[in-house]
Image: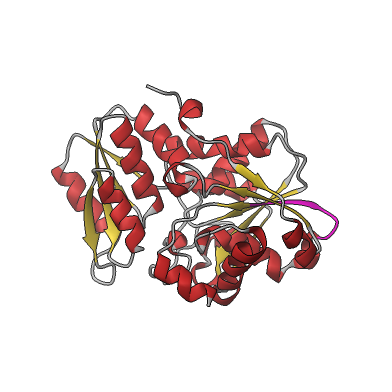
Amino acid sequence: MKTLLEAIRPTTFIESEKLKSFLGIDLTLASETFQHTGSFKFRAAYNLALNAPNDEILTASSGNFGQALAFACKVLNKKCTVVMPETSAKVKIEAVKSYGATVDLVDTRKVERSARVAQLFAEMPNAYLASAYDDLFVIEGNSTIGDELSQENFDVILSPIGGGGLISGISKSLCRNGHQAELIGAEPQLGNDAARSLKAGKIIANEQEPMTLADGARTLSLGNHNWEIIKTGVSDILEVSDETLAKAVRILFNLANLKSEPTGALTLGAILDKKEKFKDKKVCAVISGGNVDAEVFRQILV
């Protein structure tokens, strides 16, 4: 049985001269698109599956955490059930199934994911109920990318933010490593609960699941564990329109030869909107994953 550090792949640092020249910014991409199952979520999922005492795990996910947990459970010989919205990317639904997990699809216009999870949990008394982001095992698993970023001399680190699992893990790591980089979140404008929460000083939820292009950030609110870290460890959260997000996906493909899912490109989207904010600084943009349907990717690129 491999430890977490033995199981994960190191993040891929990319310095594209074309992209740097286009932006006029000293930018490094920290890409998790080559991580197992195509996103940073494997770090969290493996740590959770490894440390949870139960042999069966139940979760809700729009895709990336679901497939990462399904693969981790397969490796560790545990059962896995994933509640997913019917609107999840097809490539993500099929990936979860391919790793042997049970997929429970829900119409979120009629039933919230959390309600369906609660119903299933009542029927699965021996299961561990895992949040894709609001879980200490998840945060600790995600902190491993922060440990890698802490080895570099960045002035600013940008992270996508949905439920807050990734950015809180990075924040926790920067703190314990004594790294002084400014940590900034990048969030879809259509689901800007995290930005509103940071400004208000308390968790403010979206009224409904936001139908943003960034399907990995279609969350109702930040997690409670995440919020306790984010409110002091994150300096700002920048909102990105879906139009800018699509542009960021195209730029990553054309100038950095990198296929990113829309959620993963949130950080570049934030930079495109706020270039002056990052001038004369050494910037790192975390590209959190590359799992995007071929047809959706084609439509974005044309």
Q: Give the image location of residue 40, x and y in percent.
A: 50, 45
State the quadrant of the N terminus: top left
User: Measuring 65% from the left and 58% from the top, which residue is drawn there?
Assistant: 256
Q: Give the image location of residue 86, x and y in percent.
A: 27, 65
Write the start and end of the magenta stretch as one range: 279-285
Q: Is residue 258 above or below residue 73?
A: below
Q: Is residue 141 above or below residue 107?
A: above
Residue in front for this viewpoint, 29 or 208: 29
User: Measuring 55% from the left and 37% from the top, which residue is drawn there?
Assistant: 143
Q: Give the image location of residue 37, x and y in percent.
A: 41, 45
Question: In which quarter of the view is residue 89 placed?
Answer: bottom left
Q: Is residue 280 magenta?
A: yes
Residue in front for this viewpoint, 148 or 123: 148
User: Measuring 51% from the left and 64% from the top, which residue is drawn there?
Assistant: 262
Question: In which quarter of the view is residue 264 placed?
Answer: bottom right
User: Which of the colour schemes (rainbow, by chain, secondary structure, one colour) is used?
Assistant: secondary structure
Residue 259 is at least partly visible in this image? yes
